[in-house]
Amino acid sequence: MIAVLRDLFRYNGEFAIGCMIMAIILGIAAASFFSPYEPIDSYLVALDAPPSLEYVFGTNSRGQDIFWQLTFAIRNTLAFGFIVALISRILSLVIGLISGYMGGIVDRILMSINDTFIVIPLFPLLVLLYFVLRDDMTWFVLALVMAGLGWAYDARLIRSVMISLRTREFTNTSVFSGMSMPRIVTQEHLPYVLPIVFSTFMNNMNWSIGLEVTLAVLGFTDVDTPTIGGMIFWANQHSAMVSGVWWWYFFPTLFVTLTFIGLFLLAISMNEYIDPRSRLDRMGNS
Amino acid sequence: MRSYAIYVAKRVLQFALVVFVGISITFLITHLTPIDPVEHAVAQVSTFGFSSPESIELLRQSLKELYGVGDNLWEEYLIFWRRLAMLDFGPSLSAFPTPVSELIGRAIPWTIGLLTVSTILSWFIGNILGGLAGYYSRNRILRILGMIMMGLHPVPYYIVAFVLLIVFTFLLPILPSSGGYEMNLATGWTPQFAGSALLHSILPSLSLILVGVGSWFMGMRALVSNIVTDDYVTYAALAGVPDKKLVTSYVMRNAFLPQITGLAMSIGAIFNGAVITEQVFGYPGIGRLLVEAVHAADYSLVLGITSIAIIAVSAAVFIIDIIYPLIDPRVQVTQ
Amino acid sequence: MTQISASAGREHAHVLETSDLRAYYRMKYFGIDREVRAVDGISMHVRKHEIYGIAGESSCGKTTFIKAIAAAIRPPLEIVGGQVNYSFIDDDLYALPPARRTAIRWRHLSYILQGSMNVLNPVRRIHKTFEDFAFRHMHLPRAEFDQEVRRHLERLRLPAEILRSYPHELSGGMRQRVCIALATLCKPEFIIADEPTTALDVVVQKDVLAMIRETQHEFGSSMIFVTHDLTVHANIADRLGIMYAGRLVEEGRTADVFANPLHPYTAHLIASLPTLGDRHTRDGLHGTPPNLADPPKGCRFHPRCPLAMEICRHENPALTTLAKDHRVACFAASSDVLPTPDGKPNRHEELEIER
Amino acid sequence: MLSRRTFMWLAGTFLATRPALGQVPSNDLPREQLLILENPEGTIKNAGWFNIWAINAGGQSTGLHQNVMDTFWYIDPDHGIDGVWDNSLATEKPIYNKNFTEMTVKLRSGVFWSDGIEFTADDVVFTIETHMKTSGLRWSAPVQINVAAIEKKSPTEVLFKLKKPNSRFHALFTVRWNAMWMMPKHVFEKVGDVLKFDFNPPVGLGAYTLHNFDRGGKWFIWKKREDWKRTSVARFGEPGPGYLAYIDPGPPEKRVIEQLNHRLDVIHDLSPEGMFTLAKDSPSSVSWFKGFPYAHPDPTLPSVIFNNRLEKFQNKDVRWALALLIDIKAVSMASYRGAATISAIGVPPTGLYPKYYFAPMEQWLTGFELDTGKRKIKPYDPTIGKQIAEMLRPSLKDQIPTDPADIATAFGRGWWKPDPEAATELLQKAGFTKQGDRWFQPNGQPFSVKVMVEGDLRPVMTRAGSIIAQQWRRFGIDANIDVAQGTMLDRRGVGDFDTFIGWSVETWGGHPDLSFFLDSWHSQFVVDVGKVQPPRNWQRWKEPRLDKIIEEIRTIDFDDPRGVELGLDYLKLAAEEMPIIPLMAYNVFATMDTTYWTGFPSLATKPYTNPVANWGNTKYMMVNLKPTKPAK
């Protein structure tokens, strides 16, 4: 595994850049633990100060230092994306594996549910759920809800990989050698499926973070927990753009975009690792 | 032909099932809302004007009767399906007694107009540029374009829209900031109206296209760079098949086919409305209507919009499932 | 420049001639240089009307060699040195302007590839592929072109209906036959066949081989036929070249090579062919083919060679003619075999050490 | 290649339409005759609906109730053109009999409906009778509860016979924001079901008629009537604008942009920062105050409203302790960036109320003593308004008034001095304990207070709520804001909150009578938590002494001077008991662009009405507006 990472880092520019970006982002998120301010407190520093040596990213109209706000926002946003991705990966993995393995009626039922989830319009549903759950719709509940809605595509993907694996030679060999099905799945097939899970992990994080930003900007989330979208929400509340406090938008946007690019690069380099053809092309084995 | 018929029948069944489950879930969720449309009406009456506590109680009673809320949920559910069968969603609660279908009918042409054009445009632009960038992977201009797209496509849509709005209505005020057309114009197929509607659609569609092109571009480029290494492309290149033919008939054609499914889904998703676009640009479409309906606890309207959205997306998937075997020779109708 | 006239002089005898051909994969990432010498100094020729077989284990450089003589070079693969000359052009293949190179393809030089499933565009009907590949070379009006295609198929005893089909609607054997028809439609002087029978079952394989033989004979084309399967070579090749680690180690008439392998590697390959009634377990070669990014010094086979001598560790044996039409590169085979005059400088190795 | 052909076609159509993009479509509305106002209702879902008597079906403040509707009386939230009280369709004030069971209204003659029919007592009788027999109309309930019968005495006189004595029955027909509007009998008598009639085009008594509107609900254009002289507003002269456009300009930043581009003459409300941008960058924009704090204080009193039924808030010492933990200067800065008019007492510091109530209360407040259990303190600090002004002066300089009287009107007078020590004593007196950094209730539970706010539907209130929660949190109370965006109304009704930032006090502004909100505070209307509380006693405060005050107000006349005395009693009682913590006036950043029109109301020169564009009372603004550019 370490050798794979080392090779990826060495031969794959995307992976290297993605890693560096994510290192910076994680560094900033980690800085939140050293913040001199509580994230929800306001009117602590001068209002509307542009970026300067004292306030690197400036301050906002709520008297908060944007740099320290951002550290919390990135931490929460990343944690949010991570939880959504983690839970939805588990769902899609389990459902994809079961569906691909059992086949028949189980497969058909699971895939019908799956297709329903693909088809239901997500955004209206989230807005509706927000209104049903209202202040119970905390950051964590939202993560659970999004995880519950975000597994369908990838479950289908994993299922199709499973189906193709099931028909391969080595599965039969394992069957004949008397291995039990669960053991075959976990020992023989999981290694093929896991890279897909990792790659979709990154994409799923991107998806959930993007959606969280959107919902937050529209005020459909818990605005008390600082997130990237929450920062933009507050900037809007204070008409920051027309009053010239552009840095209130700029830095959250910059860092969320960097996060997206970083995760995206990791996802595509992971894809290359999965797809041996392009990997070989790079490594140059004739 | 027989296998195709079975295939179609299965898809029809699936379509019906998805629509049924989807709409039922939305029905349940909307009716679980703690927001009471009667209270909203009462609040609207009493917030500013004169109101005595006794009369408010009386008002509440008569509104409950009028709106027909508070019945048995199961009965409401049956009534809902009976009405839906006749494409009737009942009266809107926040614009009582105007029918939901009338409100939707007013908003939907704007959304369809805006989203069809921008979806199709971004599909073509993104796929063609992405295809070229995947094929001519060493072309400098296309590489730069690829980097721009990679930087652009993850920017949250809201930011793109907002920046466009600020640039073209505030810093350089040359485009209208909100609405679907100029004030006081008569609606109709006049050149004036069409010009005004087009002018007002520039910013919303530009924002949608910028973001849409990015994601199609990235997807297509990845697809094409895989296809380029496929044997039939190598073989045709070895055979000296001219480059133009190779790009179009060999690479692009194969890469476009999966993208057609994506296009169909996006077109179906049009009926979700572009909530944020319509919000940012004050566009009179169905996405805004939905948010307003949610705010006003108008569940007949919410249900009306989401039902249409669910039907549209599943119909798009259904149609593409049925047509796909006919357009892509590789797909065999076995399952 | 003098070499051109020299090769032009032999035009009639040899359809293809390569001299000291070198094709390396070169990669540069973050300052790390890497070079894989997949084809390292191959000189050989193919005579008119001849089928020349190339054998070797996988990743011995067969496919790269084919890419090099077919001018199918894409980065990171590069031609580092040597020449490729065809009788139907007056110049080194790589000295031609790209447009001329393209014009030669299919008209004079065509290919049959392995993996018949994927070599035909899955979303194009067969007749479209015929059109794409050959129409511009035939200089015929469309109707006559179609006639010609039908006639050609008939000659190869293929049903004309397949023209209306998509590739996936045909069986694997049928697809390979279509490829052969496609490759021979323009009656090219030279055909490159890369493992054309590998994916087929034995019965179909036999038919396809027969078909290749017949067409080659009928149209008088010359051919390079690459496969790792020596039994196939025994059936089809006039002459046989054995490749190991990017180099040609032995070459001779197929019968001679089988009867009297001079190189220990060839001997091993032939010995490992199953024969009826033989129940001995065979000794395999120990070790694996060398990493071409960092090949062993001297003879590349020496780490696995049962006959390795001291000289093998330092010097690279030159391919030397020991009998009529029979060349070998092995110090153990004969004392006539000398080291290659230019014991390649080790500059790349030096770079490798850095990392 | 179908795709390529289609693409070329699309590209072609796009290019072909490009020339049309450059030109702004021509418009038959001359800008110099047009006044463009913001309608804060936003986009009207059901734009083609003008039947204002049906609830919620269409827009109200689209210009419809400001300029088309009319009723008997108007009370101005500010000074009024000709006094606070205006007899609009009536010619005199309501005439009650002795025990308030009958009300006679004398009607103005010579007023015509916009379709040329004369307005008479028949229209009044029809309007009332329609409401008596139809349930579910906007004013059906109060009419059905109060009116036994209505009689037409003559074409210009009607008599209401009431079911029970009601000294404030006329309030139903007295516009404060809105009131019960008159229906045109000749239109509605032909209608089968009044509830299902869209009334398009509307027929009204105001000086404007419908000219054009957007089916999508983004704009409504009204045209001045040719016969504007035959309307009640003609007494004050000819309305200035030939056309009125009420539009939905979008969120605050877009309103700023539109006014900077002179495409929006009257902004209804802005964020404070948006207001400051206009004050800085738009020399032609004016507001109610000439300088800071610009905004018009609405006669509404945003407060911290306790749920007095909850155990933890039942002791007034707890409520007082929480009040003494609030630093109103910080609240003013956080919510309005200083542009707030603070109030320590239970009525808003707006309109004529400083004269009626604030001046008389000042002395009492200064002497007011609070027993903390350990000592007596005087919590009132009369200089807080001045302190806010001084705090802002360094940055805003001459925008800040210097005259103490001006400061008092702009920033308010005094408020409670933050006193954490007294708060500690009060909480301890109430049996609360502090363990470590945290406060616990007498029952051992941690003392947690949620502050419910409405999110971005009421941004300024949300900001106030978060700073107050922060101040409480610093003191060791587990306080957090609770964003109830969209659900606030429902949760307020059923009492599903600890505290919220909102208002239960709304007044006439111009008239001292408090019954407008106070009557509903009677304990007879208080219901249990979980049931819907009728407006406006959201705090569910039960107080026998208050009931007595309310009962006496019911028996006296609207204009009786005794009303003010009873009002002062209420204020003192509310200060002692602290059922809600009054904060400040609801300041509305109404901003007017003088590029095309002058004569907008302003405090210094012409405080004749409220400039806030959704008030029915803004019909008086139209007759005062003059174009800056002569009509062609």
Image (cartoon, coloured by chain):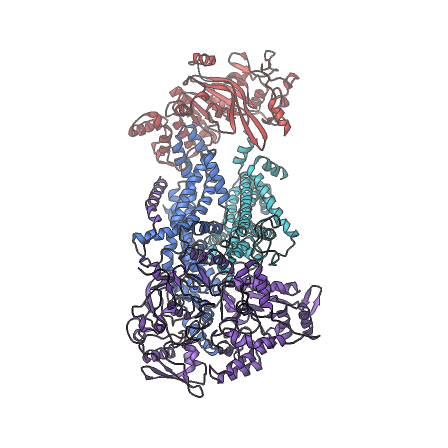
Q: Where is residue B211 in the image (x, y as percent from the top left)?
A: 46, 47
Q: Is residue D374 above or below residue C119?
A: below
Task: Name the image quarter holding the N terminus of chain B.
Answer: top left
- Identified at 65% across, 54% down, the residue is A36
Does residue D154 appear in this view?
A: yes
Does residue D191 appear in this view?
A: no
- Chain ID for purple: D
- Chain ID for red: C
Q: Where is residue D358 in the image (x, y as percent from the top left)?
A: 55, 74
Q: Is residue C242 above or below residue B280?
A: above
Q: Colour of chain A?
A: cyan
- Residue lying farthest to the left in this orientation: D116
**Residue D18 relative to residue D480: left or right:** left
Choose between A221 and B251: the one closer to the eye: A221
Quadrant housing residue D189: bottom left
Quadrant housing residue A224: bottom right
Q: Where is residue D131 in the image (x, y as percent from the top left)?
A: 38, 77
Q: Chain B is drawn in which colour?
A: blue
Choose between D304 and D605: the one closer to the eye: D605
Choose between D301 and D218: the one closer to the eye: D301
Q: Where is residue D340 in the image (x, y as percent from the top left)?
A: 54, 65
Q: How many marks?
A: 0
